[in-house]
Amino acid sequence: MPHFRGLTSLAAVLVTLAWTQAHAEGQVDPTTLYEVSTEGTSTKVKAGEQGVFVLSIKSKKGAHVSDEAPLKLELKGTQVVPAQEKLALKDSVAKKAAGQQYAEPRFEVPFKAEAAGKGTLEAKLTFFICSEQLCARQQKTFSLPVEVL
């Protein structure tokens, strides 16, 4: 009888693996539903002058950034001081176009460059990406170098 017990355990493991794989294939990886970009952010700024931090979220077809769940953008800097340190969806400069169900969030936050040297802008973004199958919390962090001249 011990020989059959081993076969039963092996069969149970194989069934479990097959079930797990089948469900994993049905799941969508939420990170494939959007792109986050900081294109347009000032990377060189003269001391005492202003630059701008830009962050945009582009959803792929069939997905959107939730306008019901909280979106948070937290900024801090070294050698540079953001005009706002905490932002929400309401602070997005992008608004819904006519006929558009959801806006694609875009933030443009001015920052002041202090003294010459190497500066950094740190950003922590938390939002929910949704599709028909899921609504998943996403968190991204960015560290952008800023040369203060």
Image (cartoon, rainbow, N blue to C red):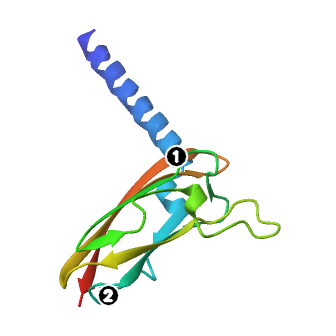
Badge 2 vs badge 1, beta-carbon distance below 8 Å? no
Marked residue nearer the N-terminal end (2 or 1)? 2
Q: At label 1, which amino acid type do we have?
A: Ala
Q: Where residue 120 appears, x then y in whole percent?
A: 25, 73
Q: Position of residue 81 (x, y in %)?
A: 32, 70
Q: Residue furthest top?
A: 1
Residue at point 48% right, 46% down? 137
User: Is label 2 in a helix, a strand or a loop?
Assistant: strand
Q: Residue 138 vs residue 146: left or right? A: right
The front one of 26 and 18 is 26
Say which quadrant the C terminus sits in: bottom left
Q: Secondary structure at mark 1?
A: strand
Q: Which residue is mark 1?
A: 136
Residue at x-position 60% and y-position 70%: 93
Q: Residues within 10 Å of mark 1 (few under 14, many from 20)?
A: some
Please report the residue visible at 28 percent of the width from the left and 20 percent of the height from the top. 6
How far across and down, in percent of the image, does residue 133 sit?
63, 45
Can residue 74 be seen from the camera position used here? yes
Amino acid on which the number 2 mark rests in the picture? Val
- Few, some or many C-alpha atoms within 10 Å of disc 2 (few <14, some 14-19, many ≥20)? many
Residue projecting furthest to the right:
99
Q: Is residue 78 left or right of residue 11?
A: left
| Camera-nearest residue between 139 and 20 | 139
Eyeballing the image, is 33 above or below 40? above
Q: Which residue is mark 2?
A: 45
- Vertical comparison of 75 with 55: above or below: above
| Real-space Cα separation, disc 2 to disc 1, in angstroms | 37 Å
Residue 137, above or below 113? above
> In this rendering, does residue 29 appear at all?
no
Q: Quadrant of the N terminus?
A: top left
